[in-house]
Image (cartoon, helix red, strand yellow):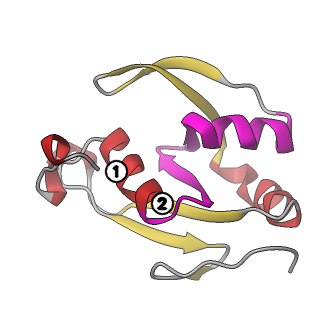
Amino acid sequence: MAASRKKEPGQLSVMDQFDCMKEKHPDALLLFRTGNTYEIYRQDAKKVSEILGTPVSTRTVGKEKNVDVASFPHEALETYLPRLVRAGMRVAICEQLEDPRQKKKEQEVKHGETTLHLTFEKGPR
């Protein structure tokens, strides 16, 4: 992350959080839970679209314009996560831990049903 974008953890926008997590885990697909959906951004959106056949749209996310976004309902995670893993992808599920109205956001990395701290699995189960 560029020095000009560094902020306190509670002040990071969704895209700042994506950039930070992507920098730490460049080979993982990052799925961000936003309300009742999982959103996938930028290059990850294109990979997910190719594997799952979900559409990619371009929209504004926070203050960033023209961001590629794929999404699916959180109920579909049980269907989509195994498909992504079987396709050889490492997947990190980023859940918001605090109320977004408080503007203090932390990210917890999860894989499947097990909470992991910066640990991933790759390939078929």
> Hey, what amino acid is under mark 1?
Gln
Q: Quadrant of the C terminus?
A: bottom right
List the residue tagged with mark 1: 17
Q: Which-is-in-front pick, marks 1 and 2?
A: 1
Residue pictured at 26% horizontal, 53% vertical = 99
**Numbered disc 2: secondary structure:** strand
Q: Does label 1 or label 2 sit earlier along the sequence? A: 1
Position of residue 45 relative to residue 31, above or below, is: above
Name the residue beneath numbered marker 2.
Answer: 94
Q: Is residue 85 left or right of residue 36?
A: right
Residue 73: give x, y in percent of width and height.
66, 42
Q: Is residue 25 magenta?
A: yes
- Residue range (magenta): 24-53
Place residue 63 in its image quadrant. top left
Mark on residue 115?
Answer: none
Q: Are marks 1 and 2 in contact (CB under 8 Å)?
A: yes
The residue at the point 76 percent across, 61 percent down is 81
Q: Which residue is rendered at x = 88% and y = 75% of the image?
A: 124
Circle 1 residues within 10 Å: few <14, some 14–19, many ≥20: some
Q: Residue 88, located in which quarter of the rendered image? A: bottom right
Farthest-out residue, front: 2
* Spot occupied by residue 5 in the image (x, y as percentages of width and height): 18, 42
How many tags in the picture? 2
- Of helix, strand and loop, which one carries label 1? helix
- Label 2: how many Cα within 10 Å (few below 14, some 14–19, many 20+): many
Q: Is residue 14 left or right of residue 120?
A: left
Q: Residue at the location (86% across, 34% down)?
A: 53
Residue 121 against residue 37 in the figure, above or below: below
In-front residue for pair 49/113? 49
Name the amino acid type tagged 2.
Cys
